Amino acid sequence: MRTLDRIREVTPPPLNARELEMARVAQRCIMEALDHSRAASITLTTDEGEQPQVEVPPAALKLIGQLLGAMSEGRSITVMPANREFTTVEAAHFLNVSRPFVVKEIEEGRLKHRLVGTHRRIAFDDLVTYANKMREKQAGALERMADNARELGLDY
């Protein structure tokens, strides 16, 4: 089974309005607690009324807060190890481009990779850096097109 298929398997169902609000409130509470102190803990309440207190490192609480914020906005979330490497097929899926395009970008030196035998592997960090550069170039091209349209007096 491919990694991307496994990621899709663990994607939770969409949240209802009550759950979105719960995520929004929890995110606000966590972030406010982190703003006012160096350490924080979470109290868990179960159906039986138990309330164990759990100590969580501030960095982990910040990450949990960011995840809750994304969830409350209805955004998709993917968590993966930073040292994860992608095949060219997985990289193409991640970038939403074709595999031949990824291979061409590698061969032209625009996308970093390493060889494992004869197979290319792309580090996740390198893939994210490339994706950000690609988005910046796209935004720049769109801005130039808009400037040209304004110069020509075209309304759109």
Image (spheres, rainbow, N blue to C red):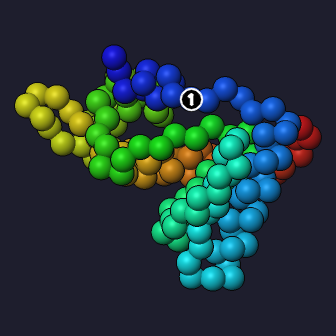
Within-10-Å neighbours for mark 1: few <14, some 14–19, many 20+: few
- Observer-nearest residue: 93 or 109? 93
Placement of 68 over or under 3, stated as above or below: below
Give the quarter of the image for residue 44. Answer: bottom right
Placement of 32 over or under 86, stated as above or below: below
The residue lying at 47 percent from left, 44 percent from top is 79
Name the outermost residue toward the bottom: 37
- Observer-nearest residue: 136 or 17? 17
- Observer-nearest residue: 117 or 16? 16
The reply to whether residue 73 is visible in this rendering is no
The residue lying at 85 percent from left, 39 percent from top is 18
Name the outermost residue toward the left: 117
Which x, y percent locates residue 29?
74, 65
76 sits left or right of 16 in the view: left
Tell me the quadrant of the picture where the C terminus can be found: top right
Give the quarter of the image for residue 119. Answer: top left
Which x, y percent locates residue 115?
14, 37
The reply to whether residue 91 is visible in this rendering is yes
Which x, y percent locates residue 108?
28, 40
Q: Secondary structure at mark 1?
A: loop
Quickly name the residue at label 1: 11
- Observer-nearest residue: 151 or 137? 137
Tag 1: residue type?
A: Thr
Name the outermost residue toward the top: 1
Placement of 77 over or under 100, stated as above or below: below
101 sits left or right of 38 in the view: left
Which x, y percent locates residue 40?
59, 73
The residue lying at 30 percent from left, 49 percent from top is 83
35 sits left or right of 4 in the view: right
75 sits left or right of 90 in the view: right
